[in-house]
Amino acid sequence: MRALIVDDEAPARAKLRHMLGAFSDVDVVGEAADGASALSLAAELRPDVIFLDVQMPEVDGFDVAASLPDDAPALVFVTAYDRYALKAFDAQAADYLLKPVDPERLERTVQRLRKSALAAIRPSVGMPANLAIVDRGTTHIVRCADIEWLEAADNYVDIHLAERSLLLRRTLTALLRDLGAGFVRTHRSFAVAVDAVQAVNTKSKGDATVVLRSGAQVPCSRPYREALLQGLRR
């Protein structure tokens, strides 16, 4: 079982690495001190499980989870605070550990991971504050509030901001599940941020064009128009 440890505090990483060393079938393949580095290492090392701190500067643990691809490893959230537990388990996390981590509790976590189909565990983390998108060796921190629209591109989503776009390796359906009610699907391949909509221009046969604050125009097919209008009314 290949494990990646993510925590912005070096002593916490060292302690967890030492504790995981007690399990002969767990191999800690890397450590990251921040969310952006975690995403780069996850893509490079392909771990089976990520032990992920929740509170980290700029990109927190839930932001990291939302930015991982759909075939991401299992996630075990590790934090000093129990108030995130409900959100973590709603996200279908493999487990949730409180600091200081108890050795017996960690053993139960490892046993649970051994029994799990690790590749099938994919969290739905709820509306993140940011997405961390790795592009050509650079990690871009994108505020979800700045996203105007989304476009499906095979197993990627083209994230459109006012002046640029970036590719995130996720499916549109899974990403929309995490982004929540602030985004509405307008087409099989498109979705828009409700707050970015300036106008909806109706066309023939019930289709429409959605005009966004940057001036971009996104198609809205008839089956999705009512959901869009409901989202705007909310």
Image (cartoon, helix red, strand yellow):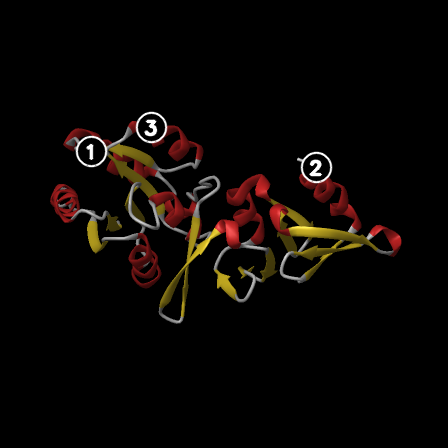
Say which label, 3 or 2, has the lower sequence index. 3
Q: Give the crowd class for mark 2: few <14, some 14-19, many >=20 residues within 10 Å.
A: few
Q: How far is disc 3 from disc 1 in space, using C-alphas?
A: 13 Å
The kind of secondary structure element at disc 3 is helix
Residue 33 at x, y percent in the picture: 23, 53
Say which label, 2 or 1, has the lower sequence index. 1
Q: Give the crowd class for mark 1: few <14, some 14-19, many >=20 residues within 10 Å.
A: few
> From this viewpoint, which residue is outermost toward the bottom?
136
Q: Mark 3 or mark 1, which is nearer to you?
A: 3
Q: Which residue is mark 2?
A: 233
Q: Which residue is mark 1?
A: 99
Residue 216's label in the rendered image is none
The kind of secondary structure element at disc 2 is helix
Q: Amino acid at mark 3?
A: Arg
* Viewer-side residue, 17 vs 193: 193
Q: Is residue 165 left or right of residue 131?
A: right
Q: Which residue is mark 3?
A: 83
Q: How far is disc 2 from disc 1 in space, using C-alphas?
A: 43 Å
Q: Amino acid at mark 2?
A: Arg
